[in-house]
Image: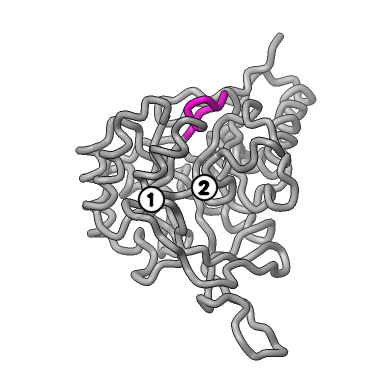
Amino acid sequence: MKLDLSTTIAGIKFKNPVLTASGTFGYGDEITDLADVSKLGGIITKTITLKPKEGNPPPRLCEVAGGMLNSIGLQNIGVERFVKEKACVLSKLKTSVIVSIAGKTADEYSKVIGLLKDEKWIKAIELNLSCPNLDKGIVCKDRELVKEIMLRAKETSVFPLIAKLSPDVEDIAELSTFLESLGADAISLINTFPGMAIDIKTLKPKLANITGGFSGPAIKPLALRCVYFAAKTVNIPIIGCGGISFAEDAIEFFLAGASAVSIGTASFIEPKATIDIVKGIENYIKKNKLNSLDEIIGKLKV
């Protein structure tokens, strides 16, 4: 019997539950020589905004124990160039494509969605409400702004909407419920944790922006906790993200309640990590004599 690795998020059926995390896989075209994206459940593109952004000044990346820090600051080419230059490649990929977007205001989010509405190859929009490297702070910490963004996005969008949230909030489960009540079709948990590193020789921060987002294996237990508590309170699917490096990590997220996972920092270490994780999940299902992924989602025994 053929194993069923498919999963459904926001009404979209993905061939398997492994996606690339936004910001770690470019626009989907830079890494196709290194990894066969057709074997992935889908990709989530680098976040795009209404106008091009230069991002934060370098250095913007540094390796730290258990992971890395980044302060990219949403550098991107803007939605108009994205459509002109990237759509032709993305539309031909043999996998599902989710486009990540951000803005300073609800109006900007809405305008970006409006400029994407004719791109039929897009399966869903991920609303980045959680970048830790912006001057105005993390969007999802401002409830009124989040509400305005979601309501405007729902009015404009012809695509399902996935809200990506930060762990740097008081109650991730309550925030997830709030997004669900506003019409989010799925939740993506979590973005990076705010962090910093200091060079003790120069006495300066290792990032020009002083602080950045911490990702990598060290945050996996923290991310897993967020998914577990959110999954107990919402009825919409969750995409788990945070420190997933191996199939065993992904299995933990499924047991905690995630319906899919997105892989970030691990791809910097090994570009084929996502494909290895797909194979590992398949082996786990075979070894445990299961028929489908659904048989382990949310099946944590407590």
- The residue indicated by pointer 1 is 78
Residue 134's image quarter?
Answer: bottom left
* Residue shown at 61% from the left, 35% from the top: 18
Q: In terms of secondary structure, where does tag 1 sit?
A: helix
* Residue shown at 30% from the left, 41% from the top: 113
Question: Relative to 292, is 228 above or below?
Answer: below
Q: Which mark is residue 22?
A: 2
Give the magenta-colored segment's residue range: 90-97
**Front-most of residues 57 and 294:** 57
Q: Is residue 3 left or right of residue 257?
A: right
Residue 94's image quarter?
Answer: top right
**Front-most of residues 84 and 36:** 84
Which amino acid does the dot numbered 1 rest on?
Gly
Which image quadrant: the N terminus?
top right
User: Magenta span has 51?
Assistant: no
* Residue shown at 58% from the left, 29% from the top: 41
| Whether residue 181 is visible | yes
